[in-house]
Image: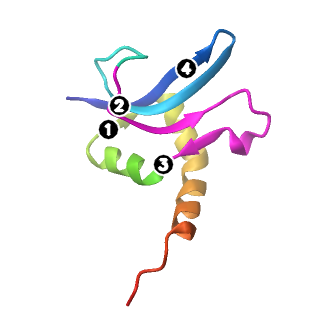
Amino acid sequence: MAVRIRMKRMGRRNRPYYRIVAIDSRQPRDGKVLEDLGTYDPSIRDTDSRVTLRPARIKYWMSKGALPSENVQVLLRKYLKKFEDAEAAAAPPPSA
């Protein structure tokens, strides 16, 4: 099964909202997903708060061979580092 990381359109007409999902490449755009990996809301004015990502799960799916779509690749390039840093700061330090 070829897995892709791409956007699934949600929301109403003229008010799009997207979920970033891991999905079988043969599924339609709004088909059955394997896992939700984040969101993208283009109508939010503050560009830094438009995207939410789960970096650990994105890294997992990419290690299994999932390929991001072109649009998702742009979002990952821009925002993945920010969410990785936030996740590392929130995680408790390992005990010795």
* Label drawn at residue 4: 2
Name the residue rendered at 33%, 44% in the picture: 61
58, above or below 96, in the image: above
* Label drawn at residue 31: none
Q: Nearer the viewer, residue 73 or 31?
A: 31
The quarter of the image holding the C terminus is bottom left
Task: Tell me the distance, in whole angstroms, between the alpha carbons under discs 4 and 2.
Answer: 18 Å
Task: Tell me the distance, in whole angstroms, between the alpha carbons under discs 2 and 1.
Answer: 5 Å
Which of pointers 3 and 4 lies earlier in the amino acid sequence?
A: 4
**Position of residue 17 measured from the top left corner of the image (x, y, whole percent):** 61, 24
The quarter of the image holding the N terminus is top left
Other-residue count near label 1 (Cα within 10 Å), few / some / many at <14 / 14–19 / ≥20: many
Which of pointers 3 and 2 lies earlier in the amino acid sequence?
A: 2
Which of pointers 1 and 3 lies earlier in the amino acid sequence?
A: 3
* Label drawn at residue 66: 1
Q: Amino acid at mark 1?
A: Ala
Q: Which residues are magenta?
A: 32-54
